[in-house]
Amino acid sequence: MPCRKKKDEGLDDVQKAILNALKDFKEPAGCKEIAEKAGLPTPKVTGKLRGLKNRGLVESPVKGKYVITEEGKKAL
């Protein structure tokens, strides 16, 4: 059985909240900033960001900081 890929599946509420929060930042944001803006616990954001990055919905131009990609904006 192949690895589970969520590439074609929709976003869950936490992923949507993270992307919506990232949309509002003008500069790359860290997990804590994203969590505060999205009203989520930081560890949950940290875990979800890895999956969003693997799907190409966010990228990390600076270590530990994230921005939403065009694909991420389209996914919302």
Image: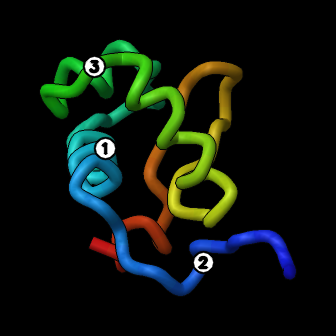
Counting labels gives 3
Which quadrant of the view contains residue 12? bottom left
Which quadrant of the view contains residue 61? top right
Whichever of callouts 1 and 2 sits on the residue coming sooner in the sequence is 2
- Residue where numbered disc 2 is placed: 7
The residue nearer to you, when weighing 6 against 34, is 6
Q: Where is residue 65 drawn, in percent x and y?
A: 55, 25
- Residue where numbered disc 3 is placed: 41
Look at 52% across and 62% down and name the residue there.
57
Look at 43% across and 66% down and name the residue there.
72
Q: Where is residue 41 drawn, in percent x and y?
A: 28, 19
Q: Quadrant of the C terminus?
A: bottom left
Q: Label 1's element?
A: helix
Q: Is residue 59 above or below residue 29?
A: below
Which residue is outermost to the right? 1
Q: Is residue 53 left or right of residue 17?
A: right
Q: Label 3's element?
A: loop
Look at 85% across and 79% down and name the residue there.
2
